[in-house]
Image (cartoon, grey):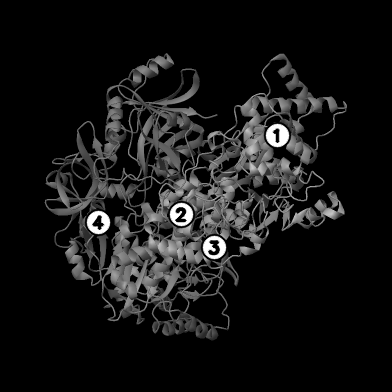
Amino acid sequence: MSISALLSMGRCCCRCCCPRGLWMLSAPCCDDRRMCVCPGPRRIGIPVRSSSPPLFSDAMPAPTQLFFPLIRNCELSRIYGTACYCHHKHLCCSSPYIPSSRLRYTPHPAYATFCRPKENWWQYTQGRRYSSTPQKFYLTPPQVNSILKANEYSFKVPEFDGKNVSSVLGFDSNQLPANAPIEDRRSAATCLQTRGMLLGVFDGHAGCACSQAVSERLFYYIAVSLLPHETLLEIENAVESGRALLPILQWHKHPNDYFSKEASKLYFNSLRTYWQELIDLNTGESTDIDVKEALINAFKRLDNDISLEAQVGDPNSFLNYLVLRVAFSGATACVAHVDGVDLHVANTGDSRAMLGVQEEDGSWSAVTLSNDHNAQNERELERLKLEHPKNEAKSVVKQDRLLGLLMPFRAFGDVKFKWSIDLQKRVIESGPDQLNDNEYTKFIPPNYHTPPYLTAEPEVTYHRLRPQDKFLVLATDGLWETMHRQDVVRIVGEYLTGMHHQQPIAVGGYKVTLGQMHGLLTERRAKMSSVFEDQNAATHLIRHAVGNNEFGAVDHERLSKMLSLPEELARMYRDDITIIVVQFNSHVVGAYQNQE
Amino acid sequence: MFSRLLLIVRRQRTSPGWQNWSSARRSASAAEAHSVALPTQAQVVICGGGIMGTSVAYHLSKMGWKDIVLLEQGRLAAGSTRFCAGILSTARHLTIEQKMADYSNKLYSQLEQETGIQTGYIRTGSISLAQTQDRLISLKRINSRLNVIGIPSEIISPKKVAELHPFLNVHDLVGAMHVPEDAVVSSADVALALASAASQNGVQIYDRTSVLHVMVKKAQVTGVETDKGQIECQYFVNCAGQWAYELGLSNEEPVSIPLHACEHFYLLTRPLETPLQSNTPTIVDADGRIYIRNWQGGILSGGFEKNPKPIFTEGKNQLEIQNLQEDWDHFEPLLSSLLRRMPELETLEIIKLVNCPETFTPDMRCIMGESPTVQGYFVLAGMNSAGLSFGGGAGKYLAEWMVYGYPSENVWELDLKRFGALQSSRTFLRHRVMEVMPLMYDLKVPRWDFQTGRQLRTSPLYDRLDAQGARWMEKHGFERPKYFVPPDKDLLALEQSKTFYKPDWFEIVESEVKCCKEAVCVIDMSSFTKFEITSTGDQALEMLQYLFSNDLDVPVGHIVHTGMLNEGGGYENDCSIARLSKRSFFMISPTDQQVHCWAWLKKHMPEDSNLLLEDVSWKYTALNLIGPRAVDVLSELSYAPMTPDHFPSLFCKEMSVGYANGIRVMSMTHTGEPGFMLYIPIEGMDFIGRDALLQQKQNGVYKRLTMFILDDHDTDLDLWPWWGEPIYRNGQYVGKTTSSAYSYTLERHVCLGFVHNFSEDTGEEQVVTADFINRGEYEIDIAGHRFQAKAKLYPVTSLFTHKRRKDDVELSDLHGK
């Protein structure tokens, strides 16, 4: 495999996404041999060669993709091929206006203005696509369910002696890929040497290498940061003397959530170096470990290790290649640590943690426990400007992107935004051929004067749980860009409590026949039935995120269409979605409260 | 007072049912603005101005009691009575219910003539549809029983159904039952007519008067406290409908009346283009969970859904049922069912969906009778949405009960005392009624056990038995094992096991019976009611001699099987009494007699602090060691000889068994097989009914418990007898079975039932002699098919003991021969 293939995020960049159905029919198609603008909705938009074969899907086991069994080679792509989409022949697709693209590479910024949305695109294409060959795109409800449920996972905290002593009842998680392979990752684990549970979602860009690595490694860094000195010593001594190690994490994984076997030794060595330093740094006085500090340290340390491993390289060519892929791709992370009533959320990037609060009247309200690190956040803009000289004030964030390229303002990996130009060049030159051949890795961001421009340092928020705090939703931006946070919390809340508020019908004065009423009721029941199809709150949320019509009800036809998009097209209509819904035990939380 | 009532009534008669009620209400209340002082005393105070209260008042006054006050917290006939769908149906599962409905039907049909108040009574007939063969069997069983009490009914074909009703889709039906004399009537108007008649007979009626609580002294009603003052009274009747539970609890000495309300919905439509004829029959489509009746040219249709909505659990006591929400989404399955049954109604315009809460009881039978704890406190409530059908008959029985001490029919199945204290928590009731309400239209098969509200009381051995594969049934809140499923055997799922034929547990029980007959078995009988009666002197013996029919002055250690009789010579309870010492007795009676038997004893016990009655049911685990090898087992465990010489039959002594000491061992069983009862401690000359018995002895009895052995019955292929099957003697109906069982010994079905001798001319009951029993050809009617049966006079006592004392027989003709 060539390095260009390795790093050809191109395949993804080539596909442009059109969230919520914005598209431009008259968008100029790109020329065969030319790199072109891809202001797509992806985190990253970069040019690649048309010859680039698919990237590392064969090098890394990817979470199973189960998509599009019916229409892999359907006419849909042909229809679009002529209209605006050119993934087969062209380097890259010109594309719709996409406000949410993560990272883009724009040598010709003019194109950006070229591509303005047509508001009615969705409706138009809908009509066109489905009126001609309606059967082809239709998935039956069981098919829809098998797609939606393929990655769902639930964990219930076990009870002891009939009592549940944890403030966490359990969690539901799920993910729906739009990229192939999916770039999102998720993790959940119980800390074994300290109390508490860790849950996190990771949104990768420019490939999935970084999000994969972070999903495997971050919780170990956090757990180690939380460990008391004696436990660290005990573990170190055990390693030293070849004894069995104390387990520190109990993972709760879906079969598709894999760990890299090859890199595990390398990762372990880095982690050990970290705890050895922690042991050395210990001054002897046993101070209470501060969770917030531990989280920040863990994030920063892991990012540092990722960077260092890529600089040092590895004698094993596969691993050498892997650490470079990890470092050159990027990932955001949103991690929750729950211990009794203490809830910490550490966030880097634009995934989000949302608390579902049930008010006294039974209604639901959303409390945001994380800040998005992107251009919509004034304080982040301020921070970036302060961290760089005044003359860069205009270039550091352009078109709502870091250096005009990257949407999230904080991330793991992405050494292109962290290393000096010299370092980048040196690593690429000494690196494997694949790296050298890749346009994206070689490309230096414009106005790149005072790196680093990017950090993995998280913003940590603390929340003391109250009995009315019923659940926490951790989700990547794929969810938040399709649904309002209030709707998310309401849908989950109603799902979990089994309460589904529909306005009751009253005949009151209208002329209604039995037949009309029957029709109306049947329709309402169909709406409700989607609730009962799901045993998993995250699945239920995805069903709504993908299938909601303008009235906020799941429309099976729409759901079927969205899920039957061929993988090349899926990314145009939606992003990867990863969701964890953590349910709290109000009784336990209430008991904590009463203790004081 | 009466003129005031009539005012309401007159306004009301122009408006059928609830429709123009509000206007009637307004004018009525204007006329009543002046308040009338309550009387300070009365013989009877009835609480509740619905159909139950007014019916009780009506019948009491007819029977000659005049000093009666009826109190209603809101307005007359304004609760469930006002919203009632107005269907009077005699197609009931219990004969006593059929009789109540039949009486109600006859009463209501002439009420307009009697009182001059229009009741909207129309004899429409009813058609109960069967979509399945099982349903048809169930209908045939009801049909057999209706016929023998003289209510015309017949099983008809789907084609005939289509002829009787214009819009019915009959393609999915296998048959139906037509009861031509069933009717529709406005229940509110019936209540007003009953009130009016009662008022004419002297009953004083006060509305807008709430009963706060009932005053009790020495376990006897002394009066009621209302929001308008006190009334002294001897009798109080709680007819408060869904508030009856609440009211019962409001006493200082609470009266537990286990019932709970559920929302109930029906819809009303505008008239059809060609309005439905007023005599169009009412349709009950139980498999579709709906009923449909004509209503002012349109239809009224409701049902009993699978997922009921219980309400008022917290006991929200509002004055009247106000503005309950219509819930169309909840009604959707019933609406679908309606449109399947009558597709042509699609274009019919809806008027409204009525939400009318109905009250349900833990066993789907209504509640009547006197409180076991407070004398003079009577109850009539919990009608399981059949208040209109039962109202007349139930009111009559309760009035008889109060006036004569006994109703004219055996109403034990409906007696308040059938419930124990554990069956009345709010949570239990809420859960149980959610199971009961769907059961209204579920297929009711024999030996059905409720699934909710279980394990209220369990034997100390429960866990061990459960681990052995026990399947449980509930009696009086107590879990009892039915049989044990061997590890290699699978029984059908609950729903699939419903059958009127040979049940799936047949072989299991067969092997258990074989074991009892040929070897030895242990049966956990801890649930049986156990009392100890002790005294300082001879008071215990004297009381027991008075209460029980057999001589209890037996040597210490002896056991007497005997019965508690009432003044009419009827059995109140049968039991075994062991004389533990000169002054103490141990009494064992059936599980469900706990409340009733206790109340009976308490009622007849002299006030004497030296006489002590104690319920020790929970102090002993009772094991029945049964079978020919029981003697061997016991002697091996106790190192004591157990031969008849050392341990004669019907003998009791304390001994050690295994490591356990102080075990009360009795050489008797409750099953008729040889064996012993072991009572293991966990941590008792005149008598009532004597005159009647003597008279019976002299004159003979009017019914006899008779055993029938089915001759030409195929256990595998034929429908099984269960209970309530009519018995025919020489082609004439003579009674019904009370219970049935397959005898693994005889390899035949055995039924027990009371045989009467009705005069061919007058229908009057005549004396039943042994000769009468023996000289008859008998048939048992199972769902319309008659099976030949051999009759055998069967002494009840021999069901319990295989050796009887001679003087048992002499005492009464009732059991002996």
For this rendering, which residue is in front, B800 or B557?
B800
**Does residue B553 show up?**
no
Disc nearer the start of the sequence (2/3): 2
Residue at mark 4: B139
Q: Badge 4 local density, few (<14 within 10 Å), some, or many (20+)? A: many
Observer-side mark, 4 or 3, equals: 3
CA distance separating discs 1 and 2? 38 Å
The disc labelled 3 sits on which kind of residue? Gly
Could you confirm whether marks 4 and 1 are on the same chain? no
Between residues B537 and B568, which one lies in front from this camera angle?
B568
Q: Do labels 4 and 3 share a chain?
A: no
Which residue has dot 1 on it? Answer: A429
Instruction: Give the chain of mark 1.
Output: A
Closer to the camera, A462 or B424? Answer: A462
Of badges 4 and 2, the one in the foreground is 2
Asked if disc 4 and disc 2 are in contact, CB closer than 8 Å, the reply is: no
How many numbered discs, if any? 4
